[in-house]
């Protein structure tokens, strides 16, 4: 064997070995994820059983997440203070053992560093330890929550903490008809949250808070008449959207979600890039007050400092809150599907610089295109936006067609990706992703059919890491792939009435069995001949029988 042949053999073997190891590592990670999820879900289910019959499911979700937040910030502050003391040489220091009087000396420093302060006696673990014997537990918790919020008053973090515990009403009759009954439920709630094995939040392979939120949505959204898909984007879809916007990037300036929900999309950037590589922070707006509070809580749970996120409350389409912060280098969003908005009823909107370039507003009954135009307007020249879309906006006529015309004629659409159906809780519809860019090098659009990129998990479909990577590979290589991807000139899209449905451009593979007609005819002739032979034999047998009987 020559040196060249040996070298080629070693390279080939090494590449195969690395791929095998990579697949094994992915399998280990996936298994670890499912184990962590299963443990988290069991704990939440146990809490639900303890509180069953007393707290409505939708409200129960707020209680669990609110208490989880209380536990987290208690541990986060304690760990921060203890790390400083341990670094200074006092290895045995525990903040929870300090007196409230002594702790006051670090209040100002902690508010400046962390944005809030909690006295040792009001830490989650200390309150939980005394809870069974605290006849006024509801009042104790109410006081603690007010103290945490008030610790930020008059500081830069005031807006980030104001109202965060509003949905955790410890005096609600839903917990029980008497103080004793309410306190009994609160003890069970604290014990359940306290027993969650969350470890180090940054080391978990799953987004513990996001996964708890998703699981609770699955348990209770249908009973509350809510659409889970409207409030929560599955983590795997979040990862796909994020990775679409950061191709070839190791850091971004600012990230933005105009309909941020609980913040899971924004936080994927922190998970994938590292929060320090989102240089100027995380920005979002949410119209639902409860979900807005959950988003702010979620930021804290992921150790995003108060000065690194700006989550606003309000209607993004009619009252956007981040004019002073745009443009954004990365925009991701899963806006609510086909909701109503003011549209042409508001005479100011047609002159709004976000919507006016298209010359028409999105229909009043379907605001989907309004979110797309808003995102495009606030997208940086070098940026990318990835938006989950309802499939109807890709082919419907009227105003939506005129907006598609504007987007294609100005070469703003980079890619349309068809996702599998049944990915989102609350809807089985196969959604799409629209990728927008302002600085494209070619006057064409990539269409990707990713409808088969999934695995079945219980009643839902799910994207695996392999599925996500396959989609990203096709997106980045930007080449035709039979039955999967097609690069289409914008002129052809124009000739097709600006229809952006993936099925219009990516040929569907015909999986039906191919039948050889000539061979089939031959087989039929053989069967007919055999049938004639059998009939002759039967006739002969009958004649023989009749002859014998005569």
Image (spheres, grey):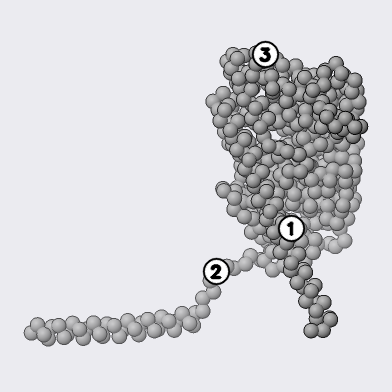
Q: Can you tell which quarter of the image residue 151 is in?
A: top right
Instruction: Tell me: 148 left or right of 175.
Output: right
**Res. 368 in view:** no
Image quarter of the N terminus: bottom right
Q: Secondary structure at mark 3?
A: loop
Residue depicted at 91% across the width and 26% down the height: 109
Q: Secondary structure at mark 2?
A: loop
215 up-or-down from 441: above or below? above
- Residue 258 in picture, x, y percent from top left: 79, 40
Question: Mark on residue 136?
Answer: 3
Image quarter of the C terminus: bottom left
Q: Nearer the viewer, mark 1 or mark 3?
A: 3
Q: Secondary structure at mark 1?
A: helix
Which label's residue is closer to the chain start, 2 or 3? 3
Residue depicted at 71% across the width and 31% down the height: 68
Instruction: Tell me: 146 left or right of 430.
Output: right
Instruction: Tell me: 45 left or right of 402.
Output: left
Distance from Cα at disc 1 to Cα at disc 3:
53 Å
Q: Can you tell which quarter of the image residue 378 is in?
A: top right
Q: Residues within 10 Å of mark 1 (few under 14, many from 20)?
A: some
Which label's residue is closer to the chain start, 2 or 1? 1
Instruction: Tell me: 224 left or right of 151.
Output: left
Which residue is labeled 2 in the image? 512
Which residue is labeled 1 in the image? 469
- Residue 347 in picture, x, y percent from top left: 80, 35
- Residue 10 in picture, x, y percent from top left: 79, 74
Distance from Cα at disc 2 to Cα at disc 1:
29 Å
């Amino acid at each position: 064997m020559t040196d060249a042949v040996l070298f080629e053999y070693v390279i080939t073997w090494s590449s195969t070995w690395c791929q095998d190891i990579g697949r094994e590592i992915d399998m280990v990670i996936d298994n670890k994820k499912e184990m962590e999820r299963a443990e988290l879900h069991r704990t939440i289910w146990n809490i639900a059983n303890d509180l069953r019959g007393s707290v409505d499911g939708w409200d129960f979700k707020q209680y669990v997440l609110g208490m989880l937040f209380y536990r987290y910030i208690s541990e986060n502050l304690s760990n921060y203070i203890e790390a400083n003391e341990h670094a200074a040489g006092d290895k045995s220091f525990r903040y929870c053992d300090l007196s409230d009087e002594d702790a006051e000396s670090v209040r100002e420093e902690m508010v400046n560093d962390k944005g809030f302060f909690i006295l040792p006696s009001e830490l989650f673990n200390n309150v939980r330890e005394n809870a069974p014997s605290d006849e006024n537990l509801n009042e104790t918790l109410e006081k603690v929550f007010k103290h945490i919020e008030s610790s930020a008053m008059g500081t830069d973090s005031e807006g980030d903490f104001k109202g965060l515990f509003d949905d955790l009403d410890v005096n609600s009759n839903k917990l029980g008809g008497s103080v004793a009954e309410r306190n009994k439920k609160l003890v069970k709630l604290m014990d359940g949250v306290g027993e969650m094995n969350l470890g180090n939040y940054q080391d978990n392979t799953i987004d513990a808070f996001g996964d708890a939120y998703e699981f609770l949505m699955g348990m209770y959204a249908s009973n509350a008449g809510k659409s889970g898909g409207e409030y929560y984007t599955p983590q795997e879809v979040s990862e796909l959207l994020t990775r679409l916007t950061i191709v070839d990037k190791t850091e971004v300036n600012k990230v933005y979600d105009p309909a941020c929900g609980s913040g899971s999309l924004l936080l994927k950037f922190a998970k994938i890039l590292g929060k320090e590589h989102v240089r100027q922070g995380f920005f979002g707006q949410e119209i639902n007050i409860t979900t807005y509070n959950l988003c702010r809580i979620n930021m804290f749970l992921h150790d995003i400092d108060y000065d690194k996120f700006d989550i606003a409350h309000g209607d993004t389409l009619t009252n956007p809150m981040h004019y002073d912060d745009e443009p954004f280098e990365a925009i991701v969003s899963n806006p609510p599907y086909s909701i109503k908005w003011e549209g042409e009823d508001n005479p100011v909107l047609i002159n709004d610089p976000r919507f006016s370039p298209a010359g028409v507003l999105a229909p009043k009954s379907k605001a989907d295109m309004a979110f797309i135009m808003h995102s495009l307007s606030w997208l940086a020249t070098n940026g990318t936006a990835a938006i989950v879309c309802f499939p109807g906006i890709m082919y419907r006529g009227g105003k939506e067609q005129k907006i598609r015309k504007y987007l294609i004629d100005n070469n703003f659409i980079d890619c349309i990706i068809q996702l599998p159906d049944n990915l989102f809780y609350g809807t089985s519809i196969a959604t799409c992703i629209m990728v927008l860019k302002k600085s494209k090098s070619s006057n064409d659009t990539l269409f990707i059919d990713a409808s088969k990129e999934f695995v079945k998990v219980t009643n839902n479909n799910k994207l695996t890491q392999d599925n996500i990577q396959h989609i990203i590979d096709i997106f980045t290589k930007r080449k035709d792939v039979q039955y999967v991807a097609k690069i289409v000139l914008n002129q052809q899209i124009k000739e097709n009435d600006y229809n952006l449905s993936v099925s219009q451009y990516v040929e569907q593979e015909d999986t039906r069995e191919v039948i050889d007609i000539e061979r089939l005819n031959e087989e039929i002739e053989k069967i007919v001949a055999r049938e004639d032979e059998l009939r002759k034999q039967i006739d002969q047998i009958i004649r023989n029988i009749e002859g014998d009987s005569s």
